[in-house]
Structures are given as C-alpha cells and as structure tokens.
Amino acid sequence: MTTEGQTIRFAPGELIFKEGEKGDVIFHIERGIVEIFVGEGTGIVVLTEMNPGEIVGVMAAITGEPRLASARAKTEVISKKIPSQSITEQVKTLPKWVKAAFKDYRGRLDHVNKMVQEQSREIKKLRKKLQPEAEKPAVEKKA
C-alpha cells in the first residue's frame, strides 16, 4: 500500500470509527483484525472482519458521505491513518466511469446495510416474543 500516514494502535474492543461519522480518514491495517458492524448495544450485527493488508473506511473517504458502518479492533490493531485528501487526489485522476461505479457501489452497500439493520431489529422482536415463560419476569397475582 503506502508508507504515508500516521501509525495508530488500537486495543482489542476499541472503536476505530462510528457509523454516521464523517469519513475524513482511512485505515490501512498492518497488524490485527478489525470488525465492521452496524447497530448499537444489543442490536449490533457484525458484517465482516478485515485483516492485515486491507483498508477500512474507503467508501466514506471517497464519497465524502457519512460512514455506513462502525469499526472496532477485534485484536490489537496497528494501522496507518491516511487522510481522505490523499485518496481524493488519487480519485480525481480516475475516469468518470470508475467514479460512477464507486457511487453505484456506495448506494448498493447502503441499501444492504439498511436491510441488515431492519432484519436485526425484527429478529430482536421475535426473540422477545419467543422468550420461554420461565425466563419472563414473574407477575405477582392478587388473591
């Protein structure tokens, strides 16, 4: 990839970036595993894991739109933090059809992420409905 950028360490479980944030940097993973996920609290859905040699946060850096998902270190992670300006300068040199492909891909990815979040909410509702009676809180009966 590149030697450009600042070396950053993330402890296991540490948030690298949050869904909805401005994507002004990308991270080139040099060591460790990064989880990409959507949702919060008990509604988290892990979409994928990223490994050394891969880049995290590219779509937001290219499009300038908010991040579609969050990223956190699954293990200790060492990465290069690269400003989106470096990417933007390179993207400017690409043919228009490649830029259009990135935009199309971003739209499709956003659609899939929204579907995953919706399904996650539905599964959570079903789990609550199907919770065994023994696990439900006892209700005091009046005599």
Image (cartoon, helix red, strand yellow):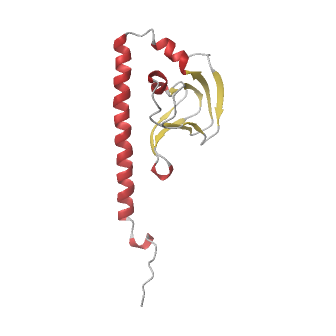
Q: Residue at x 35, y 46 (%)?
A: 118
Image coords of residue 112 (percent x, y):
35, 36
Image coords of residue 70 (percent x, y):
50, 38
Horizontal side of 41 relative to 107 (left or right) equals: right
Residue placed most toward the observer, 52 or 136: 136
Horizontal side of 74 relative to 62 (left or right) equals: right
Image coords of residue 127 (percent x, y):
38, 59
Image coords of residue 132 (percent x, y):
39, 69
Residue placed most toward the observer, 69 or 24: 24
Q: Residue at x 38, y 51 (%)?
A: 121
Q: Residue at x 56, y 40 (%)?
A: 74
Tell me the quarter of the image containing the C terminus: bottom left
Tell me the quarter of the image containing the N terminus: top right
Q: Residue furthest bottom?
A: 143
Quarter of the image for residue 29 reads top right
Q: Residue at x 45, y 11 (%)?
A: 92
